[in-house]
Image (cartoon, rainbow, N blue to C red):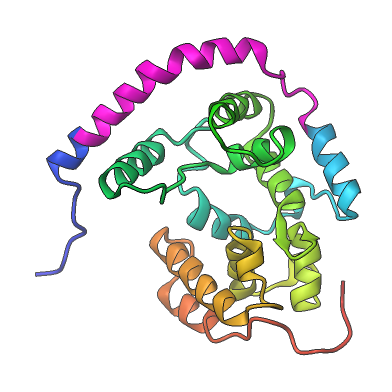
Amino acid sequence: MGSHPRLPTPVNIRRIGAVIAVLAAVVAPVVVTLWVSTPDVSDVQARVAAVTREHGVALLRPDQVPDLLAQAVVATEDSRFYSHHGLDTVGLARAVVYDATNRCLCEGGSTITQQLVKQLYLNNSDRGRDKVIDMVLALKVEQVLSKQQIMADYLSEIATGFGRYGVAQAACAYFRAPLSNLTVGQYALLAGVTQAPSVYDPTVNPSAAEQRRSAVLRDMVNERYITAAQAAAADLEPVLAASGARDC
């Protein structure tokens, strides 16, 4: 008989349900208050434009984000991105359960939208009250921007290495090619770098970048964006393009 994926145990399901209920009871009154006191995010696009101007990088349109890159980011950063409304309550609850069980702050639970607003409105802070504020702002942003626009904004301004911002600049620096003309492995590497740019910058730590790329490729296979054969082939690619003229 073939193997089947292991289903969550009833205990884990009850535990996650209980955590969601507690979070809702504790956070809901705070969210209501903060909804009134926080910005209305009508300036979110102006903020993204200002950040990209400051760093001298391109502000991507949604149609300039390759599907494979978006899929790589979703697979490794926020698998329910296209179905949630700014907050991934399932992921957040699992993170809380994991941290409580292991007595650590190991899991984040932040969505792509939360990461975007944290950069734009909170100076990248996720401490204390700011963590709740980024939840509120994420809910607001999802009401005014499409998922495709959020993804484009996030990839336009995200750090991608030492002093490097935006995936378009990273594609040119790492692969000497425009963002639209990369391979599966290169998109996976870009998606992986954004998690910890100082650690996974391939110009500084190619071994760590390669390991991170492998993890992203596995995530893409698990989410059925690519096949295992595609992942295996992509894993054999060099992490950096050979030296030569840039086509970007």
Quarter of the figure with residue 177 = bottom right
How many labels were placed on the picture? Answer: 0
Measuring from the top left, give residue 38's x and y in whole percent.
Answer: 67, 18
Q: Is residue 42 highlighted in magenta?
A: yes
Relative to 175, is 90 on the left or the right?
left
Which is the main secondary structure of the residues drawn in magenta?
helix
Instruction: Looking at the picture, tell me which residue is in the foreground, 33 or 68.
Output: 33
Quadrant (top left/top right/bottom left/bottom right) for the N terminus: bottom left
Q: Nearer the viewer, residue 118 or 140?
A: 118
Residue drawn where x is 47% and y is 63% of the image: 220
For this view, does 21 lie left or right of residue 119? left
Please identify the quarter of the rendering in which residue 242 is found. bottom right
Percent x, y for residue 128? 53, 31
The residue shown at (68%, 31%) is 145
Q: Is residue 197 above or below residue 231?
A: above
Range shown magenta? 15-44
* Quadrant into which the C terminus falls: bottom right
Q: Note whether 86 is above or below 1 in the view shown.
A: above
